[in-house]
C-alpha cells in the first residue's frame, strides 16, 4: 500500500498504522488501542441466522487485551449454528486482525474485530460458513492458478409512516435524488461507516422500488461493492446490513432485506458479480470480447445454479420474487445486459473509445485502462446464507473448467435478447427452470451434493442440515396457494421481514 492509498483510505487503523490491513499484527492492534484510548473490544461473528453476533470485552489492562487477541474466547456453538448439538457445543471465536475497525455507534472508543470459529481441538470449524468459503476460494486458486474475486449488490427497503411531502413515484425510484428520495442521507452515512470498516464500496443509489401501502412508505436502495477477496466481500455485506439496521433504529425506520415485500412491486435481490484474475489481470476478456475462461465459468455456474438456491434463496418468500416478467430469473440461461437470466454479463468498458476524452474535449487519461468486466449471478436475495452462496458459486465456476462441453453449453444457453419475447418461445422450452420453492431447492441440492462435498469443502452434515431446514417449510406450491390472497401474503412477508 503506497502513500497515496494510505492517505485516501477511510479506515482509522490504516491511517494510524500506515499499512495494508492484511499486514496488521497483534502488536499493531495493541498499539492502536493504547494510543487511541480504546476502552472496549467487541468480537463480531456471523451466526447461522446470517446476522452479526457480539461479545463485549472491557479492556482493563494491556495484558488482558493481549490475552483475548491471542486466544480468542469460548462461545456456545449450539446457540449459533443449528447443526451443532448442545452436548458438544463449545467453540472458540478467534479474532482476525485484518478486520479490525472502530465501532461507529459507540460513544466510548470501541474496537470491533471479526472472528473465525475453531473447534475443541483448535482446528478451524469445518462446518463454519467462513471456513467453507475459505476452502472453496483456496481450491479455486490451487486448481486454476487464478484468483476468484467477487462483490455483492445489497438491495434493501426503508419502511416508515407515509409522508405527503415530495412523494416518490410508484416503481420509479431508480437513482432518485432528494427530496424525492427521502433516505439518501441514511444510505450515504452507512456507506461511510462500511468504508471505514474496510469495505470496498463502488457506489450507492436509490432503486426502482418506491410505493405506499396501508399508510406506510417503502423506499428501495442499493449499495454496490468493488471486486475483492470472497471472504472480505461477504463479510462487508454482513457489516453493511448491521450498520443499516443500526442507522434505521437511530432514524426511527425499519430496514428490510426481505426478497419480497408485496405483490407487483420490486423485490430485493443480492446479486453477486464475479471474475477471475491471474497475476492481477482480469481474465474475463480476451481480444475485446468475453473470454472462453469466462464462458466456462458461466457454464459451470448455470449447471449448478438451481442447487445454489438452497443457500441463496433459503426462505419461502424467496420464491415469490423469482417469477417471470419481474426482472428476476426463472429460466436457467445467460445473456448480455438481460435482467431476466440467471447470469448476466453487464457492460464492461470493453469498447476502444475513451469516453472521458470525448466528454472532456479531448483530455486523455495518463494510463491505459484495465478491464472491469464481470459476470453477475442474479438469483440470490437478501435472505441468503452469504458465505455458502459464494462458496457454491466458486465451486460452480471451477466445475465449468472440468466440463468437457462447457463452451458448447454456454453457446446453447445464451440469449441475446429478452427471453420472454415471442421469438424465444422455442428456446424457453429447452431450458431448465429454477426451483419454485424451498422444498424443490432442497431436492436439487441433495441431487447435486457430490459437487459441493468434493474434497470435503462442504461437510455432508451441512448439506443434510440445510436440506432438512428447507424441507421443513413444506412450501411446495405456495405461490399458487397465495395467488389472490393478499392477507395470507402479507402475513408471510411479515414473518420474514427481518431475515439474515
Image (cartoon, helix red, strand yellow):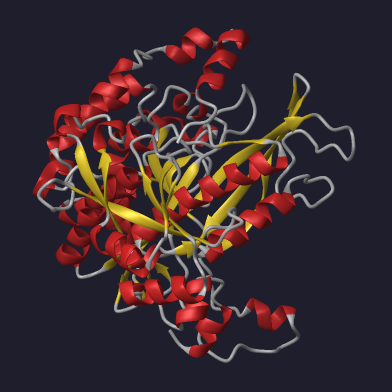
Residue depicted at x 32% and y 52%: 298
Residue placed most toward the observer, 134 or 67: 67
Q: Outermost residue toward the right?
A: 165
Residue depicted at x 29% and y 23%: 469
Q: How many marks?
A: 0
Q: Position of residue 128 (x, y in %)?
A: 24, 45
Whether residue 444 is visible to the viewer of this picture, yes or no, is no
Image position of 140 with respect to 322: above or below:
below
Q: Outermost residue toward the front?
A: 60
Report which quarter residue 100 is drawn in: bottom left
Whether residue 220 is visible to the viewer of this picture, yes or no, is yes
Image position of 334 with respect to 21: above or below:
above
Where is the C terminus found, in terms of image quarters?
top left
Q: Is residue 2 left or right of residue 80?
A: right
Q: Is residue 43 left or right of residue 120?
A: right
Image position of 202 with respect to 237: above or below:
below
Q: Position of residue 98 (x, y in %)?
A: 37, 68
Image position of 160 with respect to 197: above or below:
above
Q: Is residue 151 left or right of residue 257?
A: left
Q: Position of residue 393 (x, y in %)?
A: 31, 49
Residue placed most toward the observer, 353 or 164: 164
Residue depicted at x 33% and y 47%: 387
Q: Position of residue 163 (x, y in %)?
A: 84, 33
Where is the N terminus found, in terms of image quarters?
bottom left
Amino acid at each position: 500500500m503506497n502513500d497515496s492509498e494510505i492517505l485516501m483510505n477511510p479506515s482509522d487503523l490504516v491511517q494510524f498504522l500506515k499499512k495494508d490491513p492484511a499486514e496488521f499484527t497483534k502488536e499493531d492492534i495493541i498499539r492502536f488501542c493504547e494510543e487511541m484510548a480504546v476502552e472496549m473490544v467487541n468480537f463480531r461473528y456471523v451466526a447461522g441466522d446470517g446476522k452479526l453476533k457480539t461479545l463485549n470485552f472491557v479492556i482493563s489492562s494491556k495484558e488482558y487485551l493481549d490475552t483475548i487477541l491471542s486466544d480468542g474466547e469460548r462461545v456456545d456453538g449450539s446457540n449459533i449454528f443449528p447443526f451443532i448439538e448442545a452436548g458438544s457445543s463449545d467453540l472458540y471465536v478467534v479474532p482476525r486482525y485484518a478486520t479490525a475497525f472502530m465501532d461507529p455507534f459507540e460513544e466510548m472508543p470501541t474496537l470491533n474485530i471479526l472472528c473465525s470459529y475453531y473447534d475443541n481441538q483448535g482446528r478451524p470449524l469445518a462446518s463454519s460458513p467462513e471456513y467453507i468459503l475459505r476452502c472453496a476460494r483456496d481450491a479455486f486458486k490451487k486448481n486454476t492458478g487464478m484468483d476468484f474475486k467477487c462483490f455483492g449488490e445489497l438491495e434493501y427497503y426503508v419502511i416508515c409512516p407515509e409522508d405527503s411531502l415530495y412523494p416518490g413515484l410508484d416503481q420509479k425510484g431508480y437513482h432518485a435524488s432528494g427530496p424525492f428520495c427521502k433516505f439518501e442521507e441514511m444510505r450515504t452515512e452507512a456507506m461511510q461507516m462500511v468504508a471505514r470498516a474496510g469495505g470496498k464500496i463502488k457506489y450507492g443509489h436509490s432503486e426502482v422500488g418506491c410505493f405506499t401501502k396501508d399508510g406506510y412508505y417503502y423506499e428501495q436502495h442499493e449499495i454496490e461493492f468493488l471486486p475483492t477477496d470472497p471472504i472480505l466481500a461477504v463479510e462487508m455485506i454482513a457489516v453493511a446490513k448491521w450498520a443499516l439496521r443500526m442507522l434505521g433504529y437511530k432514524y426511527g425506520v425499519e430496514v428490510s432485506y426481505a426478497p419480497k415485500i408485496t405483490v407487483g412491486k420490486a423485490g430485493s435481490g443480492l446479486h453477486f458479480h464475479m471474475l477471475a484474475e491471474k497475476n492481477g489481470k482480469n481474465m474475463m476478456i480476451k481480444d475485446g470480447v468475453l473470454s472462453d475462461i469466462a464462458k466456462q465459468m458461466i457454464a459451470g455456474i448455470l449447471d449448478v445454479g438451481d442447487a445454489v438456491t438452497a443457500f441463496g434463496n433459503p426462505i419461502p418468500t424467496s420464491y415469490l420474487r423469482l417469477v417471470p416478467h419481474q426482472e428476476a430469473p426463472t429460466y436457467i440461461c445467460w445473456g448480455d445486459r438481460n435482467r431476466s437470466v440467471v447470469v448476466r454479463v453487464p457492460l464492461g468498458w470493453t469498447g476502444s473509445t475513451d469516453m472521458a476524452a470525448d466528454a472532456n474535449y479531448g483530455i486523455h487519461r495518463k494510463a491505459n485502462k484495465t478491464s472491469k468486466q464481470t459476470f453477475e449471478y442474479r438469483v440470490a436475495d437478501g435472505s441468503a446464507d452469504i458465505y455458502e452462496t459464494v462458496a457454491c458459486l466458486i465451486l460452480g465456476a471451477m466445475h465449468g473448467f472440468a466440463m468437457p462441453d462447457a463452451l458448447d453449453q454456454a453457446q446453447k444457453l445464451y440469449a441475446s435478447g429478452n427471453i420472454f419475447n415471442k421469438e424465444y418461445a422455442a428456446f424457453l422450452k429447452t431450458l431448465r427452470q429454477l426451483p419454485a420453492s424451498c422444498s424443490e431447492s432442497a431436492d436439487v441440492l441433495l441431487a447435486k451434493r457430490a459437487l459441493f462435498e468434493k474434497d470435503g469443502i462442504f461437510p455432508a452434515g451441512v448439506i443434510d442440515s440445510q436440506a432438512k431446514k428447507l424441507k421443513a417449510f413444506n412450501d411446495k406450491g405456495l405461490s399458487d396457494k397465495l395467488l389472490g390472497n393478499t392477507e395470507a401474503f402479507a402475513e408471510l412477508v411479515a414473518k420474514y421481514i427481518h431475515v439474515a
